[in-house]
Image (cartoon, rainbow, N blue to C red):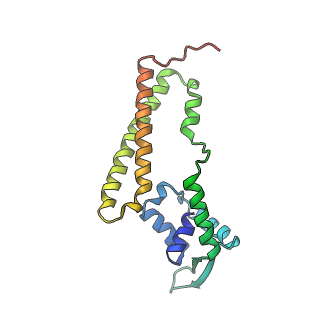
Amino acid sequence: MALLSLAGEAPMHAYRMQQLIKERHKDDVVNVAQRNSVYQTIERLLRDGLIAVLETSREENRPERTVYELTDEGRETLRQWMRTMLSTPSREFPEFPAALAFLPVLEPEDARAALESRVAALETRVAALQTELTDGARFLPRIFLVESEYQLAAVKAELEYVRGLVEDLRTDEITWDYRL
């Protein structure tokens, strides 16, 4: 989706796509840590006819660069994916709820300590997102910041929940004393 969107903005090469994703902080929602994954995705998009090669060039001692553009089929596919992703909640399997499902694997003190560490990490993330939004609002229209707004709301909700869970563990509102 990210690569189709970028190719729809303007024809560009893979390295530029990866650069823009990072510059725009879209790497918070799109995993491009490995450059190879961008190239593998481009190969799939090419194979499926969603993008096409516009040109290939080489400048002096630089590696050859292939510039890709969005096809009409790619544009329609991107729009359909977006409609579906925006309208239909999907079943996702994040790690944290899975860890909560098996919380009794740890001793209560160990679980509480781990959750307290999570609180600190979430507080740091909230601060970073607030800074990102404040800084971004200086030069970007809000439409380009909505995913950060969503992330901030989700992280704040998680932070509130985890703080409550830590407190419940601290006050023995939740215990490991159970009978099956």
The image position of residue 167, as x and y in percent, is: 40, 24
Residue beneath the point at 37% across and 50% down: 129
- Give left or right: position of 96 versus 112: right
Residue beneath the point at 61% across and 63% down: 80
| In front of the other: 99 or 106 | 99
| Relative vertical location of residue 2 with respect to residue 46 in this rendering, above or below | above
| Relative vertical location of residue 122 with respect to residue 27 in this rendering, above or below | above
| Relative vertical location of residue 104 with respect to residue 73 in this rendering, above or below | above
Residue beneath the point at 44% across and 32% down: 162
- Give left or right: position of 46 versus 100: right
The image position of residue 163, as x and y in percent, is: 40, 30
Instruction: Say whether residue 36 is visible.
Output: no
Q: Quadrant of the N terminus?
A: bottom right
Q: Quadrant of the C terminus?
A: top right
The image position of residue 93, as x and y in percent, is: 60, 42
- Give left or right: position of 155 versus 134: right
Residue beneath the point at 45% across and 62% down: 22
The image position of residue 75, as x and y in percent, is: 59, 71
